[in-house]
Image: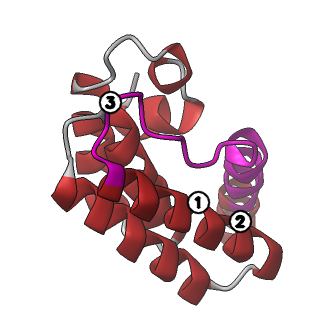
Amino acid sequence: MKNIISILVALSLFLFSATVFAGEGPMNLPAGADAKAVKHNKEGIAGWNKAVKSGDKKDYKGALKHFSMASKIDGSSGEVHFNEAICYDKIGQHGVATKHFGVALKQAGGNTKLLNSPILKGHLGM
């Protein structure tokens, strides 16, 4: 009986978190970001949108490749780290996601959407 209750609790938490975080997606880079980083970020957003439609983790990995390249080119914004973090979350690499959410928070630059993000707060225990 305890196992059944544990499974039901875990399932309800999963469904709750999926519902709460479902509306969160990648962000555009701020004005002044490197043009090549912006290009990769836009390609990452397109890959994210494809992944949302398909539900395929491979598509999230494709989006992550572009967000990671954008971060290598210009990692100064919180938005680029947030974008990496949500991809890592989607592919189940929650430890890496949490690290990127931490960097995103430090480099948020006053972006209230980022600062108030439920998924970021969830990973960082806020």
**Residue lying at 20% horizontally and 46% vertically, measured from the top left:** 75
Residue 45's tag is: 1
Distance of mark 1 from mark 3, alpha carbons?
18 Å
**Name of the residue lying farthest toward the front:** 35
Q: How crowded is mark 2: few (under 14 residues within 10 Å), some or many (20 or more)?
A: some
Check disc 1 and give the amino acid type.
Ile
Assign a secondary structure to mark 2. helix
Q: How crowded is mark 1: few (under 14 residues within 10 Å), some or many (20 or more)?
A: many
Residue 125 point in image, percent of width and height: 38, 30
Is residue 95 in sight in this rendering? no
Q: Does the magenta stretch include residue 27?
A: yes
Foreground mark, 3 or 2, reads: 3
Question: Who is closer to the viewer here, 16 or 109?
Answer: 109
Residue 44 point in image, percent of width and height: 51, 65
Residues at discs 2 and 1 in contact (Cβ within 8 Å): yes
Residue 119 point in image, percent of width and height: 53, 39
Q: What stretch is highlighted in magenta?
A: 11-35
- Pointer 1 or 3: first along the chain: 3
Distance of mark 2 from mark 1, alpha carbons?
6 Å
